[in-house]
């Protein structure tokens, strides 16, 4: 069936149901919307079924068309699609991304009292774009935050003709966990802070001066008619964060657990200074990526295996138990034994750990 993707590669049926909550509250039949989006209705609400990034675009567009509402029925009053078209036309007349962003925010504030975006310039950290979404009761607010941030990321990346180098995201809710191991926030390819005080995107200063690559509404319509993959990198080229992560995983499989920046730069065919700079432009740090990948695999071993903690540390290249405990505690905020005891009975975390271990286990 179009849109259905192999396990572990897409948005699960529970998230699909959450995306349709606004439409259901408006009296729409979710099965009918799914069929119109060329998606098997059997995916609805089922955590073991999932859709890919192209199907997600079709689904979002179908909900918007069905309700004549940009915000998928999550607001009491919403925003008609005709107003959205006027907003797109207005910002496409801007010379740079930074100005287009400011025009978009002013237009959005004028269109709806239930969406309250704002920008704040913070010295040394870029431009911070906060979003307030005042949703109706009975819907999952966090899924709206995610889908709107996903639209912002992909649309503005398309608008400037290359992926935005987001410095980071702040999300008020907890990290979403799917049993298939798919991370809906990995697509942004930047650090994400959950349980934050506000929902916010942080842009790099250098992106703000980027000229627009598209200036006509027909181009925008053609872009969506081509069903872009919202789970892929805008433009199809992986960022330096993803390439660095892949290089580190390959070195892990060779038993090299603490490769240097020089080792990874050589493997990627680039210079050390350039790799450090390119990672910084994506809001990343080499050391943070290396620590995170090792911590994720350690956590997977702790939950999805019964291997003793000392042996896990040795497997992951730590010279002694104390070193493993210190490094893991710095990553997880708790000791390995506490982590195992606290989360071993958590079904969603266990499923995610099993997926990680299946993909990255060291024999």
Image (spheres, rainbow, N blue to C red):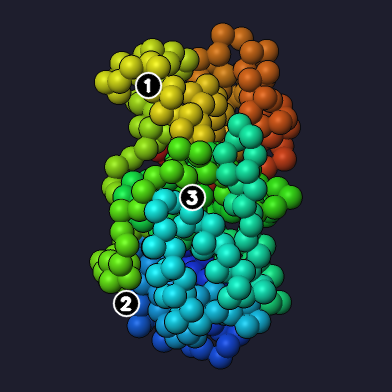
Instruction: Choose the circle earlier in sequence order: 3 or 2.
Output: 2
- Image quarter (top left, top right, bottom left or bottom right) of the N terminus: bottom left
Q: Position of residue 104 (x, y in %)?
A: 51, 63
Which of the 4 image quarters holds residue 298?
top right
Seen at 46% across and 57% down, the residue is 100
For disc 3, the marked residue is 98
* Residue 16 position (above or below residue 102): below
Is residue 209 shown to the viewer in this render? yes
Circle nearer the viewer, 2 or 1: 1
Circle nearer the viewer, 3 or 2: 3
* Residue 338 position (above or below residue 225): above
Residue 271 or 59: which is nearer the viewer?
A: 271
Q: In the rendered structure, are the residues bearing label 1 and label 3 in contact, judged by CB atoms less than 8 Å apart?
A: no
Left or right of residue 68: residue 145: right
Which of the 4 image quarters holds residue 126?
top right
* Residue 247 position (above or below residue 137): above
- Image quarter (top left, top right, bottom left or bottom right) of the C terminus: top left
Q: Residue 274 shows which numbered tag?
A: 1
Q: Position of residue 233 (x, y in %)?
A: 35, 48
Q: Alpha carbon of mark 3 to alpha carbon of mark 2: how far?
A: 36 Å
Seen at 65% across and 48% down, the residue is 120
């Amino acid at each position: 069936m179009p849109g259905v993707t192999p396990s572990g590669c897409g948005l699960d049926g529970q998230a699909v149901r959450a995306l349709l909550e606004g439409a259901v509250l408006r009296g729409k039949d979710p099965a009918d919307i799914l069929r119109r989006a060329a998606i098997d209705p059997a995916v609805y609400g089922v955590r073991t079924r999932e859709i890919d990034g192209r199907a997600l675009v079709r689904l979002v567009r179908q909900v918007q068309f069905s309700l004549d509402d940009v915000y998928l029925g999550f607001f009491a009053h919403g925003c008609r699609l005709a107003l959205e078209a006027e907003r797109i036309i207005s910002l496409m007349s801007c010379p740079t991304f930074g100005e287009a962003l400011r025009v978009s925010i002013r237009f959005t504030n004028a269109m709806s009292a239930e969406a309250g975006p704002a920008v704040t310039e913070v010295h040394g950290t870029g431009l911070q774009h906060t979003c307030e979404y005042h949703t109706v009761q009975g819907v999952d607010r966090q899924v709206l935050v995610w889908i709107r941030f996903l639209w912002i990321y992909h649309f503005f990346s398309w608008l400037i003709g290359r992926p935005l180098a987001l410095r980071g995201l702040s999300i008020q809710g907890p990290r979403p966990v799917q049993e298939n191991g798919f991370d809906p926030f990995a697509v942004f390819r930047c650090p994400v802070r959950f349980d934050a005080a506000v929902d916010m995107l942080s842009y790099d200063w250098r992106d703000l001066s980027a000229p627009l690559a598209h200036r006509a509404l027909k181009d925008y319509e053609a872009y969506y008619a081509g069903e872009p993959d919202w789970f892929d990198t805008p433009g199809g080229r992986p960022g330096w964060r993803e390439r660095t992560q892949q290089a580190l995983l390959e070195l892990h499989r060779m038993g090299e657990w603490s490769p240097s920046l020089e080792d990874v730069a050589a493997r990627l065919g680039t210079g050390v200074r350039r790799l450090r700079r390119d990672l910084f432009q994506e809001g990343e740090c080499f050391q943070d990526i290396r620590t995170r990948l090792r911590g994720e695999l350690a956590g997977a071993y702790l939950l999805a295996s019964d291997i003793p903690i000392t042996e896990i540390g040795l497997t992951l290249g730590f010279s002694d138990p104390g070193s493993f405990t210190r490094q893991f505690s710095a990553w997880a905020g708790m000791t390995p034994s506490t982590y195992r005891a606290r989360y071993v009975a958590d079904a969603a975390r266990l499923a995610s750990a099993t997926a990680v271990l299946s993909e990255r286990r060291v024999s």
